[in-house]
Amino acid sequence: MAARNLNPEKRYTNIFNTNSGHWFKAELEARGWTPLFQNSNSKFSPALVTHFYNHFNLEGFIPNERITVNWGANEVTIVVTPNLIGEILGIQAKDQTPQMQNPFSTIEPYITQIGTNTKINKRGGIKMSSLRRNQYLMCRFINDNICGSSCSGEIYREGVHVLYMIQCRNLDLCICRTLLNTIGKVLKHPRNAMSLPTLITKIVQVTKPVEFGQVQDFQILEIERPTVGYNNCDKEFWYPGLMIEDAREDSPLPPDENDTRFIEPIADPVIRDVLGTFWKAICKGVKEQAELSARIEEKLDKFIKCVTTNKQKYHADTPLED
């Protein structure tokens, strides 16, 4: 079998402190995900990470719940859960419904929220060059430090789902479950690059299946710096008000009234029809509330931009200058 590539996380603290990163940085901080980018002191052992991914036997992987691996040399079993990842990183592992945790089956439902100019490649991923500058930065961060993707110019469903949930702001996501799924997929598919090495190193530190004192090959993470891709994408920044500017009548704001999977198994057609009507009423109310909240956020963003730039006196109905 060919040697597997190592795909380390990166240090995003500096670039998140620039204009390109401040909106998403504030959102990450509000969610308690700061340890995912404030990782300047994080280090990893390539030999240990390689050993974990290549020599630990995957006994079980239940997405969003647990990974069970066994190291045959000393018959040690490790159970990795969202709670363990949360304790290691200092991030709360939350209960999560599959509707919020699992990505949609295709990219299309995300487009209205992310941007109507978004381009999809032939493999079903989003071309990051078609995004706005701070979205481009966020996608690189998601690929490197959450989904463990080595793609530099595209982002796929799992990563797009994280971006979507963050941009919606009122939608919660258990990032510890997402990280668990990233590790599980690498263990399940031996050809995938070995991702999240600093997290793997910390898991081994805590569970101690091997003598950690013998490991000597520690490396620190590289600093993420602006690349050519930052200049090739849209120079403007994404902000919540764009959700309304780009909105369509059929915007897939969750919950989706067409998602009736929980109703279909019910045998009684009368009960099924009643629940279907009730579900559509709930979805309509949630959509109206989301649109109202977004309008308020848009006006707030205009106010902040006016105050910080001193270009003009603020008026909620007056378009901003470029």
Image: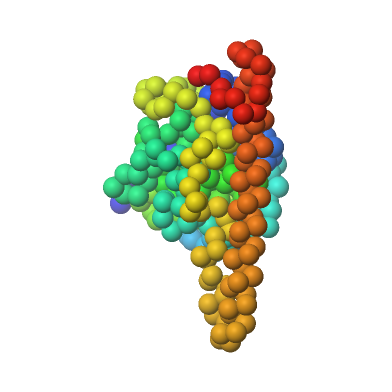
Residue found 54% across the figure and 40% down from its top:
243
The x, y position of residue 89, in whole percent, is: 66, 42
Percent x, y of residue 90: 70, 42
Quarter of the view holding residue 7: top left
Q: In this view, does 313 lie above or below 23?
A: above
> Compared to 228, does 80 lie above or below?
below
Q: Can residue 21 be seen in this view?
A: yes
Instruction: From the viewer's side, name the closer residue of 43 and 29.
Output: 29
> Is residue 129 toward the left or the right of residue 94 in the image?
left
- Residue pictured at 57% horizontal, 75% vertical: 263
95 or 91, which lies in front? 95
- Who's the residue at 62% across and 21% down the image? 305
Please, is residue 40 above or below residue 272 in the view?
A: above
Q: Which colour scheme is used?
A: rainbow
Residue at 37 percent across and 32 percent down: it is 129
Percent across and percent down for residue 241 are 57, 35
Q: Residue most toward the front?
A: 317
- 67 vs 272, nearest the viewer: 272
What x and y, as percent, mark residue 154?
Answer: 38, 39
Q: Which of 240 and 84 is in front in this view?
A: 240
From this viewpoint, is residue 218 visible? no
